[in-house]
Amino acid sequence: MTPAIEAVELSRSFVQGASAFAPPRRVVAVDEVSLSVAPGRALGIVGESGCGKTTMARIMLGLLPPTAGTVRIDGRSLATMDRRERARLIQPVFQDPMSSLNPRRRIRDIVELPLIAAGRVPRRERRERVMAMLERVGLSSATAVRYPAQLSGGQRQRVAIARALVIEPHILICDEPTSALDVSVQAQILNLLAELRATFNLTLVFISHNLAVVEHIADEVAVMYLGRIVEHATADAVFGTPQHPYTRALLASVLTPEPGLGIPDVPLGEGYPDPANIPRGCRFHPRCPIAIPRCRTEPPARAAVECHLASA
Amino acid sequence: MTAVLEIEDLSVNFGTLAAVRGISLTVQRGETHCLVGESGCGKSVSALSVMGLLPRDARADAARIMFADTDLFRLSERRLARLRGDRMAMIFQEPMTSLNPAYTIGSQMTEVLRRHRGTSRGEAATRAAAMLERVGVSAPEMRLGQFPHQLSGGLRQRVMIAMALLCEPELLIADEPTTALDVTVQAQILRLLARLQRELGLAVLLITHDLGIVARTAHRVSVMYAGEIVEQATVAELFAAPTHPYTRGLLASIPVPRKVRRGERLGSIPGVVPAIDRTFVGCAFRDRCARATDSCAALVPLREMSDEHHYRCRLDPAWSEPA
């Protein structure tokens, strides 16, 4: 089966910090990453800040050209599509709806915009589809004439979801969609996404630093570290029998709401490494509790688990 | 047990808005008391009241805020300033709110000791380096010469903790100390705080929105909603027998790995937190509560499950969810 979305050897680097005081630094945010998601599946991408997960999202949305590599949607290269075609297939939901919704537009106009951009939908039908979609995401018709600032954070995220789904895309890319929300509201949004996913048969790419949320929503999980996916497997495998030492450390750090278990001892070094200065050998070795000499010199082979010891 | 902090009937208003509405809580020596709630519930404002750091337009009132034998609420600003950073200290979510970007770590840390303890410059530097080492900062002497922007988020948080603990305070107020950090760093920082608490017998008032942090760090918990403490209990009691509908709703809304099945609906609380006016009476949760009746608009009693577990709701402890 053709994957709904496929990334082939994607790379992206940035040059930053060129100023009178600092020489420019080349930061490799995404480093030859390949992945694919089958239609209707939900892929979770997890990792710490700076691991490149948001850059991945932006490349897959066509918002940022990759330095190298290709994104394919339904088997066709994203680079060959124009904006309209892309928008009909793939849509985003971002973390902070306040900064992704135009503050000067009414909610109904915000949600209508993708339909206008797509063209060929008559005005009357557009209005109907907007109102139906607002109702579908749990917003009253009174909300339609309001402005983003008049809504709560949870309502704004519903608007962002309505806007993304109004042209019925195949793929939804959610980048930390609930991170700015309180837990009770987060639950509302997660439930809504699960319902909509079933209704519209969506393929979901769900990026989050919150592992419990990813475990709840994803069928498969990719763990990113310093620009590479170091482990990619089904959610059951990643959460049940994690292979990569980084995945294990990440899971061990999660504080589940279970009293009496205390605070886990995470055997990692103190800081996240500098993406402008990726360690030689295995990029995780300076923080790895089980590293062997080979890890310092030789990068692990490309595999579902990128680790000398896990694959041995 | 010795109470280090006793807040009794604290209220804070901003104009006509009530941010904190008559909360009472106690933090014992060597104990962590978690104040948990969602954004805007008044947890940070409560903490700032204790430290005397409320913004100018806030109006606070309290029966008393006892810190050991001193009523902080009736203390002059000058005497309060002498306690702050010395016998009681506070750390924040964003370390840059308490670190000055224009000064080195060393000059900021030594100033604390020189000001509160009159320590000499050389002695202060030695003690600052020792404290940095104690909180797990590598190469402490070198760090003293660095500026805050040269450190990672986790390191800055460690520096802020070191600075707060320099004078060996009896009380530490930590407001979302790990919210801006990655999970691996969060676990490291919380472990560090727990170790320092044991070593120093610190009383900690920890403010958080994260029930995972509450479960793993708290001895005692106060759940805040719309300016009120709606439930207070030991951590074991709170998670084993949550009683206030808000507490239950909150606990049901977090996905718990291996407990909530994938794709299963999470419990959620409908609606949003209301803005509460100074003249508001009754239960602030009633508009979002499936069990609310007309009587919830009147004054709600504080009910006791045990000496250490109370909640503010008309329902009796054995109530169950509607099927």
Image (cartoon, coloured by chain):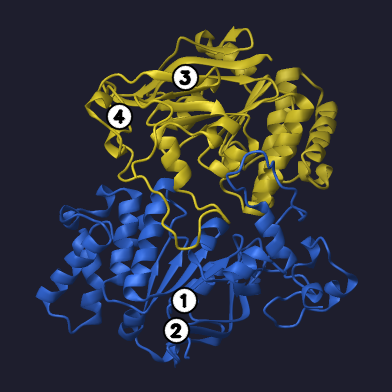
Task: Name the outermost residue toward the left.
Answer: A124
From mark 2 to mark 3, how far is it between C-alphas? 56 Å
Q: Position of residue A126 (x, y in %)?
A: 16, 73
Residue B288 figure quarter: top left
* Mark sitting on residue A4: 2
**Disc 1 or 2, which lies upstream in sequence?**
2
The tint of chain B in the picture is yellow
The C terminus of chain B sits in image quarter: top left
Residue B69 or residue A250, whichever sits in front: A250
Residue shown at the point (37%, 31%) measured from the top left: B226
- In screen coordinates, is B13 left or right of A274? left
Do the residues marked 4 and 3 share a common chain? yes
Q: Nearer the viewer, residue B157 or B102?
A: B157
Residue toward you, B96 or A49: A49
Q: Which residue is mark 1?
A: A41
- Residue located at (52% from left, 68% from top): A54
Residue wearing tag 3: B304
Mark 4 or mark 3: whose residue is earlier in sequence: 4
How far apart marks 1 and 3 lie (CA) works out to 48 Å
The amino acid marked with disc number 3 is: Glu
Residue A277 percent coordinates (x, y): 72, 69
Three-letter amino acid code of the residue under disc 4: Ile
Distance between the alpha carbons at the discs numbered 4 and 3: 25 Å
State the hue of chain A: blue
* Residues tagged 1 and 2 counted as in contact (Cβ below 8 A): yes
User: x and y percent of residue B228 in the render?
Assistant: 40, 26
